[in-house]
Image (cartoon, rainbow, N blue to C red):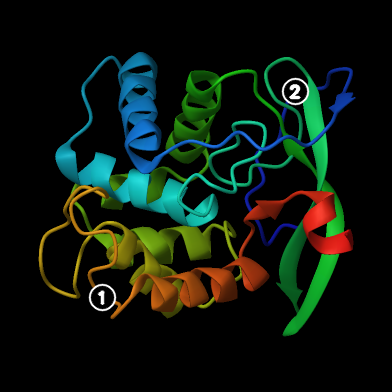
Amino acid sequence: MSTSTAIAPTAARSTIEVEPRRTVATPPELRAAIGRAYERVTGKPPTSALLDTLSAQAALETGRGASMYNFNFGGIKGAGPHGETANCMTHEVTDSRQITLRQGFRSYRSLDEGAEDYVRVLSGTFGAAMSKAQVGDVAGFAHALKQGGYYTASEADYATALRSLGGQGSTSPLLPLSAVPQATFSSSEDLSRVMDALSISAMRIVAPSDDEG
């Protein structure tokens, strides 16, 4: 298992392999689920900056929710709370080479269950990144994730995509995803190209048929 993508160790348990299934969610649904999950995990409501940043990341990692599989918000590998894992194809970069391989990703039974595990992983394993997200420091968030081995993409590209998906320019405050979904790109096609490029070296999961069909 590579340590260059989102990995959170799980307790030893019997792993149940399930089929990868697309679980489409809209950006507002992603945002709402993250907000509910954060309150359940911490007992406190999320700051607007935190919710904007995490919503942008979830949108990036799932193709704005259109490429979400098994309610996995962030390409988290391993087995979910019920011991279920879905073997999916993923693109990664190792030693500057692009590779495609099949790996097991956590599978969840609902959007809220996936969101809660996503928040727990970020709060625990990537606490430094969460502290940056709390104040809307997107560059710091991207840097801390990179340092923690969450993704293998270019740090600058990752941060730029997060800003765009959060409706943020390089200096302006973050806005909700629904407000300005492509603020730093001239068209949705431009943003899609950036997201596609990031998916090659980051850890957005795709169904086997997307690569092998």
User: Is residue 201 shown above or below 134?
Assistant: below
Q: Could you say where residue 27 lies in the image, as x and y percent from the top left?
A: 37, 42
Residue 112 coordinates in the image, percent (x, y): 48, 20
Rendering quarter of residue 35: top left
> Which is nearer the eye, 121 or 193?
193
The quadrant in which the C terminus is found is bottom right
User: Dot 2 corresponds to which residue?
Assistant: 11
Asked if one can make out residue 5 in the rendered structure from this viewpoint, the answer is yes
Q: Is mark 2 on a helix, strand or loop?
A: loop
Q: Which residue is under mark 1?
A: 184
Q: Which of 26 and 74 is in front in this view?
A: 26
Query: Which disc, if any, is residue 193?
Result: none
Q: Are there few (<14), some (14-19), or many (20+) residues within 10 Å of tag 2?
A: few
Left or right of residue 105, residue 167 in this image = left
Amino acid found under the numbered disc labelled 2: Ala
> Label 1's element?
loop
Residue in view at x 61 percent, y 65 percent: 202
Residue 14 in the image: state x and y as whole percent. 89, 18
Q: Is residue 34 left or right of residue 1?
A: left
* Residue 125 to residue 99: above or below: above
Lower sequence index among marks 2 and 1 = 2
Is the residue marked by circle 1 packed among few (<14), some (14-19), or many (20+) residues within 10 Å?
A: some
Position of 60 compared to 38: left or right?
right
